[in-house]
């Protein structure tokens, strides 16, 4: 005599779903989007930059230092003292030695503050220190 339940169990196939290739594809897409995305670096404060007809865009900026109208100094969305500029720039240059520094100073800020910040950046070892300006409205 044939045992029907034993025959059904023997013929029954277990279905499995292998999700390893799906996980691999998700990681590949994640890496693709991370590599192709350009991250915008900001100073953390709104600064009214002066205009200059000779202003040109700068690529690969490592450190942005903002100087507000009231001579407040900001790096990475936080206000710092002038004495801390050198330490922050040294730390950023340790991560990326060929990095550049851009000082984004408000057009109504003191020139002395901008010069002091520039001096601290140079003392920290930055070889490329620039002042940010925006192009006039009619320029390219």
Image (cartoon, rainbow, N blue to C red):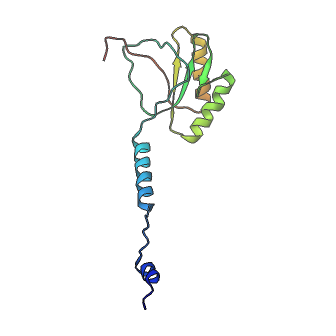
Nearer to me, 85 or 45: 45
Location of the C terminus by quadrant is top left
Hey, which quadrant is residue 60 in on the image?
top left
Q: Does 17 appear above or below 132?
A: below
Q: Position of residue 78 (x, y in %)?
A: 63, 25
* Residue 74 coordinates in the image, percent (x, y): 60, 22
Q: Residue 80: image x %, image y %?
A: 66, 23
**Residue farthest toward the bottom in the current orientation of the protein:** 1
Q: Is residue 34 above or below residue 101?
A: below
- Residue 44 picture quarter: top right
For residue 93, say whether it is visible.
yes
Q: Is residue 84 left or right of residue 76?
A: right
Residue at image coords 61%, 15%: 113
Name the residue rendered at 44%, 43% in the picture.
34
Q: Is residue 124 visible?
A: no
- Quadrant (top left, top right, bottom left, bottom right) of the N terminus: bottom left
Residue 125 horizontal side relative to residue 39, left or right: right
Camera-side residue of 138 and 16: 16
């Amino acid at each position: 005599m044939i045992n029907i339940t034993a025959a059904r169990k023997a013929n029954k196939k277990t279905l499995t779903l292998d999700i390893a290739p799906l996980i691999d594809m998700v990681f590949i897409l994640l890496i693709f989007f991370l590599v192709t995305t350009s991250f915008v670096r900001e100073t953390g404060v709104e600064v009214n930059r002066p205009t200059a007809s000779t202003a040109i865009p700068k690529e690969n900026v490592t450190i942005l230092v903002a100087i507000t109208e009231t001579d407040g100094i900001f790096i990475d969305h936080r206000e710092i003292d002038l004495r801390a500029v050198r330490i922050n720039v040294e730390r950023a240059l340790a991560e990326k030695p060929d990095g550049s520094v851009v000082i984004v100073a408000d057009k109504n800020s003191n020139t002395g503050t901008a010069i002091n910040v520039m001096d601290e950046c140079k003392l920290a070892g930055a070889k490329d220190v620039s002042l940010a300006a925006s192009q006039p409205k009619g320029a390219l």
